[in-house]
Image (spheres, coloured by chain):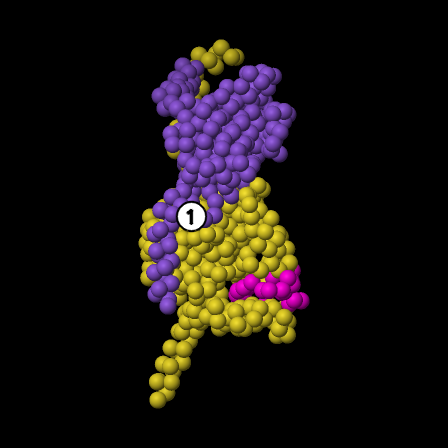
Chain colours: A yellow, B purple
Amino acid sequence: MKWLLSFVVLAIVAVVRAASFTGNRLLVVLDEQAEREKYSVFLEDLAARGFHTTVDSPKGDKVALFKHDERTYDHVLLLPAKSKGLGPALTANNLLEFVKKDGNLLVALSSEQATPTAVQSLLLELDISIPNNKGALVVDHFNYDSDSASEKHDVLLLPYPAALRSGLKNYFGGEGYIAVPRAVGQVLGNDSPLLSPILRAPSTAYSYDSKDEAEAVEDPFAVGQQLSLVSAMQAHNSARLTVLGSAELLQNRWFAEKAKLGDKAVTTANRDFAAKLSAWTFKETGVLKVGKVVHYQDEGASKKVNASIPESNPTIYRVKSDVHYQVEISEYSNDHLIPFVPAANDNIQLEFSMLSPFHRLNLSPISQTANSTIFGVAFKTPDQHGIFNFRVNYRRPFVTNIDEKRQVTVRHFAHDEWPRSWQISGAWVWIGGIWVTVAGWLAFIAVWLYSAPAEKSVKKTQ
Amino acid sequence: MKFSFGLVSSLLLSGAPIAYAAAWSFEDATVSIASKGAGVGGASKDKLSATTPLAKTVSLGATDSLKLDLTTVDGKTAKRPHQAFLTLTDPTSGLEESFVLSVKDSGKGKVSLVGITSNCTGTINNSQTQKDLPHQFLTASKPIPASIVIGAFGSSTPYKHKVFDLTVTRGANVPLAIPEAPLRYAPEAEIHHIFREDPKSPPKIITIVFAAAVAAALPILLGLWATLGANVSHLSKALGAAPVSHALFYGSIIAMEGVFFLYYTSWNLFQTLPAAGLVGVVAFLSGSRALSEVQERRLAGLR
């Protein structure tokens, strides 16, 4: 009986664990409970993936992101609210503080409701601009759903996004079309490397104010691919914030809707895209974990990363010695760790640095275990002594940051590690000189001690 | 009910192309390049066609301004569309920039772009000034395709076609401020430490020649001494007088050199010092006897 019980407990634990890498407490902020029905499939999907969802109104008394200065939730899903304010618990400052404390945030906007000021200033802080007034939305006269928006062209039908650029993994790819109804377009600041678009608008789309510019667009908010429909910010602490331009995208209604792109009938794949988007935001995908770091001096035999032995790396190396470095990296994928494989054209790099890198080398995969890839490289320590770092600083959009440092001392040659003088051909003349002097000295002593007087010279001197 | 609604709507949709048969396009389009100071007649004008792009490349100089005039039509009738853009696409980077045409209700639309340095002379209808073009376009090496996008709500087919190629030439004396590329996370260039060169020895043949010269000095020295009458003839006499002292003294001197040799090759200082001390004491004790014997020979007039 006991074993059965423990089995059940284990199974529950397994179910509970099968969620985000960082935690499964999710707060869904909704204005009205009636709204909840519209998102029920999405919320059920989240619950099925192991999230403990708490649905609350922004005005509710219980809503608090922090308790005793600790996060009360791991993730927050902010759905559009009717009111302009989000209440005292969800100020821009609180939301930012939440992200600073490693909380993840999915902000859904809607063009039919004014964006709350808290969200506006939050996005402003992150250098994401959105149109200020209610009713600004993205239209495209080329890629719209001609079933539901034959007149207004405001339901965009877009293929899944491709990788942002070469060398990046695509966590949002798939087959099919995503319906993006009445989206609020975002423009991302160009200076921040933390911002990246997930889903861009097609090049013929534009964002206009449906109230002021009903006749013809004269000063669009943004145009074409510079307009982002879904964008992401991954902070330095790897906390994630996703801005979804169209909250309607998450509604049951669009999850598997028959739509028509031009004359082609398609079924929207919003359910899959919403799952991918929330999985990424809530750290179910794209999370990297560093296992063991091993470095050692090359003495002929290669050492292997051994999981059972704790890290015991040398703390000191000599200049110009051959060193091997290995690091174990896994990627969290939905509910388990898998070996991390970087995208083509991408490299994890090792820096051997004292203030600035002396070496920056691409790590290559050496072997794989069941849930990690071991990357390694061999190099020669520079001819400069000092305190150095083995540093792997891997930052890419859409995967969590790795910054792994191991400090070692690099000493110079000890007095008995230099080549001996006879090994240096240029010294042979001087060595010869010394031994000729030694031999001459011995001969001189022998002559001085044992020489008999030469007859002639004695005569001469006297 | 639902079915019939779907039927009706599909009927409506299928009927739509017949009913409206409309497609957006444009007519009477000209693109003109006006040079600054060239006057009204100095502008070069080209007629644009909605179906085929212009064969020749339109060149926009540093002080020129580009002006595009057209009439948008929906089917046959001139009409104002909701969207009328002139879109430039950088062929290498894929960067797009759209300029909004200001279209009147009659469908007449125009947009003008100014070259790089113009002080906004030709732009009456638009607020776009010298910052019209992003720097990527100013430095583009290939011609930039320019297309016109016309679209509006409703069922009319939108229009998007390439209409001409644009080359942007920059005055040589015009400084161009290209902002620094913003930071993006990507693999950086590899760095391989450049080691200082190893110390080098001269060619071995030279070393051997000079080492041979040094070694040759010893026989030459001994030979010279021999010609001066140096010899070891009194060795037997000395050994006869004080055999132990002489053997130990000369032996200790050789042993001291041996200690130095071992120190050079393998010993450390703590092995060397006791050995040297021992040899030194032997040399001192035996030396005093041996040198007394030498003194005796000197006093006997044998040196």
> Residue at (51%, 29%) from the top-left corner?
B68
**Type of amino acid under label 1:** Ser
Task: Check disc 1: other Cα within 10 Å, few if <14, some if 14-19, many if 20+.
Answer: many
> Residue at (58%, 68%) from the top-left corner?
A31
Residue at the outermost bottom position: A1
Q: Secondary structure at mark 1?
A: loop
| Residue A453 visible in image | yes
Residue A52 in the image, given as x and y percentages of width and height: 49, 73
Badge 1: chain ID: B
Per the image, is B94 magenta? no
The mark tally for this picture is 1
| Residue A418 visible in image | no
Q: Which residue is mark 1?
A: B155
Residue at the outermost top position: A460
Quarter the N terminus of chain B occupies: bottom left
Residue B228 in the image, given as x and y percentages of width and height: 43, 15
Residue A381 in the image, given as x and y percentages of width and height: 45, 43
Q: Toward the viewer: A13 or A170? A: A170
Residue B17 in the image, given as x and y percentages of width and height: 36, 47
Q: Toward the viewer: B62 or A104? A: B62
Q: Quadrant of residue A44?
A: bottom left
Give the residues in magenta: A71-97
> Residue at (60%, 64%) from the top-left corner?
A82
In the picture, measured across the screen, residue A428 lies left or right of residue A89, that is left
In the picture, measured across the screen, residue A211 lies left or right of residue B222, that is right
Per the image, is A76 magenta? yes
